[in-house]
C-alpha cells in the first residue's frame, strides 16, 4: 500500500519521474488502490470543517472552558480542541496554566508534541528545538548564529500565539476572541465569566472529562433530559421501574445567557424535585431534593434532606464531537501536584480558610476510592447512551429537519434547548460519517484515558506490575519442584489474568442494552 501511495504521488505531482509508465492493464488493476491512496480522508476528531471562520464569527463571546487541571499532567503539553481548532495547554515554572495555539510559528508543527524545559521555563518545539516563554515570545532558535539570533527572536513572526487564561474550580478557561477579555461590564454581564458559569460547583471538586463522538447540541439535549436516566442508565443510576410521568416546566425566561426549568421525577426508588439551569453556552446545573420513601422512618431532627447536585460543562470540539467535564465529589489531595511550586503558595496571611460544607455519604465514599476507579465507573456510565446518541444525530442530519415527536412534559427542556441553539449559535457544519466499529465508537482510551493523568499513571503501574509478576512466574516455574514456589506461580498467574482484564477496562468495553436486564 505504501508503494502504491508513492506511485500515486509521483504520478500526480511529477510526471517526468515515470519515464517508463506501467502498462494499461496494470494501471487498470491499480486504479482502485490509487483512488484509495489519494482520496481525501473523512472528517474525524482531528479534522477541521471548512466553514470554521463562519462558526467562530457567530459564536457567543464568553470565556471558553477547555479542560480540567485536575486531570492534566503538569509535565506534559496537552492538545485540546475547540470549534475545530487545536490549542495546547501547559504549566509554566510559576505553576500557571498557559494556552497557546498548537502550532510552532517556524513550520507549524504542533507544540503539543514538544516538551517543557524546566531549566529554562519554556515550551520547546520537538521539531527544531525552538523555545517559547510563558508570554509566547521566542527565546531560542538553535539554527541561527549568535549575531542574528536576537533579531530573529524579537520578530513578531517568531512568537507563539497566546491567549488570556483564567482557572475556576480547576477548569481552565481561555479567551480566544481577541481584544479585551469580557468582564462584568460587558454585554453579557456576569454570565460571560467563569465564576458565574461554575457558581454551583463546590471548591475542591473532582472531575471526569471525556471527548464524545456526538455533537455539542446533542450533548446539551441529553443533559437537560432526566427522563432518559431510568432506561439508558438502568442498573447504574436507578432502574426502569423508576420511570414515571415527569412534571417538567417550560423554559423560564429564555435569553442569550440561557434559561431555567423545574422538574420532578423518581430515581433509585425515591422521588426528587428541583430545578435545572442552562448557563449558556457551556454549563448545565441541577439542584434537587429527594423526598423520603413512604415506608421509611422519619429522619433524625436537624438532619438535612438528601440532595442531588450535578454540574456538567459541555464544549463543542468539532462537528460530531463534544467534550464533557462532569464534576464529582471532593478531590482531597488527589489533584496532580504542580511541576514547580510557587513560593508562598498558600492561603494569604490573615485570610480565613474557606468554609467547608458537609459532604454527603456517597461523596465521602467516592473520595476514598482511587481516581482511576471512579473514572472507570464514569466511563461505564457514559458508555450506556453513547451509541444511540451518535446514531441519533446521524439520522437527524439525514432527515434535514428536527423531526421529533415530543408530546410529554418531559420533552419541554429539549424543545427549549433546540430553540436556544437555533436562535443564538451558528450551525456547526456537516457531521463526519458514522462510526460503525464498536471498538472505535466506545474507545475509552482515546476519548479519556490518554489525556487523564490519573488513568495514564494507573495503566503504567499495571504494566509495571505485569512485568514484575511475569518475572516472578518464570522464576517460580524454574523452581516448581518446591511446593511454595508452585503456590507462588499460581498466584502470579491469577494476578496476571486479573491485571489483563483491568487493563482492558481502560481501552474499551462494549455495552448492549438487550443484555442489561
Image (tube, helix red, strand yellow):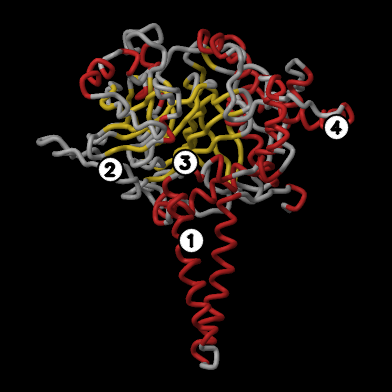
Residue topped by disc 2: 339
Where is residue 280 shown, x and y percent of the image? 49, 19
Circles 4 and 3, Cβ within 8 Å, touching? The answer is no
Left or right, 415 with respect to 206, comes to right
Callout 4 secondary element = helix
Circles 1 and 3, Cβ within 8 Å, touching? The answer is no
Mark 1 to mark 4: distance in Å?
50 Å
Mark 2 or 4, nearer chain start: 4
Residue 432, image quadrant: top right
Residue 350 vertical position relative to residue 144 in the rendered view, above or below = below
Residue topped by disc 1: 462
In the foreground, 44 or 145 = 145
Mark 1 or 2, nearer chain start: 2
Residue at image point 51% right, 45% down: 449
Q: Residues within 10 Å of mark 2 (few under 14, many from 20)?
A: some
Callout 3 secondary element = helix
Residue at image point 59% right, 48% down: 380
Mark 2 vs mark 4, foreground winner is: 4
Residue topped by disc 3: 451
Q: Residues within 10 Å of mark 1 (few under 14, many from 20)?
A: some
Mark 3 or 2, nearer chain start: 2
Mark 4 vs mark 3, foreground winner is: 4
Residue topped by disc 4: 26
Residue at image point 31% right, 50% down: 333
Amino acid at each position: 500500500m505504501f508503494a502504491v501511495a508513492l506511485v500515486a504521488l509521483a504520478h500526480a505531482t511529477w510526471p517526468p519521474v515515470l519515464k517508463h509508465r506501467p502498462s494499461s492493464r496494470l494501471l487498470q488493476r491499480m486504479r482502485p488502490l490509487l483512488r484509495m491512496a489519494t482520496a481525501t480522508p473523512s472528517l474525524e476528531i482531528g479534522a477541521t470543517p471548512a466553514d470554521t471562520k463562519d462558526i467562530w464569527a457567530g459564536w457567543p463571546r464568553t470565556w471558553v472552558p477547555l479542560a480540567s487541571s485536575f486531570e492534566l499532567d503538569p509535565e506534559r503539553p496537552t492538545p485540546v480542541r475547540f470549534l475545530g481548532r487545536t490549542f495546547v495547554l501547559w504549566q509554566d515554572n510559576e505553576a500557571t496554566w498557559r494556552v497557546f495555539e498548537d502550532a510552532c510559528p517556524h513550520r507549524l508543527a504542533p507544540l503539543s508534541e514538544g516538551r517543557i524545559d524546566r531549566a529554562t521555563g519554556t515550551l520547546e518545539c520537538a521539531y527544531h528545538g525552538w523555545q517559547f516563554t510563558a508570554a509566547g515570545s521566542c527565546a531560542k532558535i538553535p539554527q541561527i548564529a549568535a549575531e542574528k539570533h536576537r533579531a530573529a527572536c524579537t520578530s513578531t513572526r517568531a512568537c507563539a500565539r497566546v491567549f488570556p487564561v483564567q482557572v475556576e474550580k480547576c477548569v481552565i478557561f481561555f479567551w480566544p476572541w481577541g481584544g479585551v477579555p469580557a468582564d462584568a461590564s460587558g454585554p453579557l454581564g456576569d454570565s460571560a465569566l467563569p465564576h458565574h458559569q461554575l457558581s454551583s460547583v463546590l471548591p475542591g471538586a473532582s472531575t471526569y472529562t471525556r471527548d464524545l463522538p456526538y455533537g455539542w447540541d446533542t450533548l446539551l439535549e441529553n443533559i437537560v433530559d432526566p427522563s432518559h436516566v431510568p432506561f439508558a442508565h438502568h442498573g447504574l443510576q436507578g432502574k426502569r421501574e423508576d420511570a414515571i410521568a415527569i412534571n417538567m416546566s417550560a423554559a423560564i425566561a429564555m435569553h442569550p445567557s440561557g434559561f431555567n426549568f423545574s422538574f420532578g421525577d423518581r430515581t433509585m426508588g425515591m422521588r426528587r424535585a428541583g430545578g435545572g439551569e442552562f448557563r449558556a453556552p457551556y454549563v448545565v446545573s441541577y439542584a434537587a431534593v429527594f423526598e423520603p420513601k413512604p415506608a421509611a422512618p422519619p429522619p433524625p431532627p436537624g438532619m438535612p434532606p438528601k440532595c442531588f447536585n450535578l454540574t456538567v460543562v459541555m464544549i463543542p470540539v468539532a462537528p460530531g464531537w463534544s467534550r464533557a467535564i462532569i464534576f464529582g465529589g471532593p478531590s482531597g489531595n488527589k489533584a496532580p501536584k504542580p511541576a514547580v511550586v510557587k513560593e508562598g503558595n498558600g492561603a494569604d496571611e490573615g485570610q480565613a480558610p474557606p468554609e467547608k460544607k458537609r459532604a454527603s455519604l456517597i461523596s465521602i465514599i467516592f473520595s476514598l476510592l482511587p481516581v482511576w476507579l471512579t473514572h472507570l465507573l464514569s466511563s461505564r456510565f457514559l458508555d450506556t447512551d453513547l451509541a444511540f446518541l451518535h446514531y441519533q444525530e446521524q439520522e437527524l442530519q439525514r432527515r434535514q429537519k428536527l423531526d421529533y415527536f415530543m408530546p410529554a412534559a418531559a420533552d419541554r427542556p429539549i424543545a427549549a434547548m433546540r430553540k436556544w441553539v437555533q436562535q443564538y449559535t451558528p450551525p456547526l457544519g456537516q457531521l463526519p460519517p458514522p462510526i460503525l466499529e464498536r471498538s472505535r465508537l466506545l474507545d475509552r482510551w482515546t476519548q479519556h484515558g490518554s489525556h487523564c493523568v490519573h488513568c495514564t499513571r494507573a495503566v503504567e503501574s499495571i504494566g509495571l506490575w505485569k512485568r514484575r509478576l511475569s518475572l516472578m512466574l518464570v522464576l517460580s516455574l524454574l523452581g516448581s519442584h518446591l511446593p511454595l514456589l508452585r503456590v507462588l506461580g499460581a498466584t502470579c498467574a491469577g494476578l496476571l489474568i486479573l491485571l489483563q482484564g483491568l487493563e482492558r477496562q481502560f481501552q474499551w468495553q462494549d455495552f448492549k442494552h438487550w443484555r442489561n436486564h
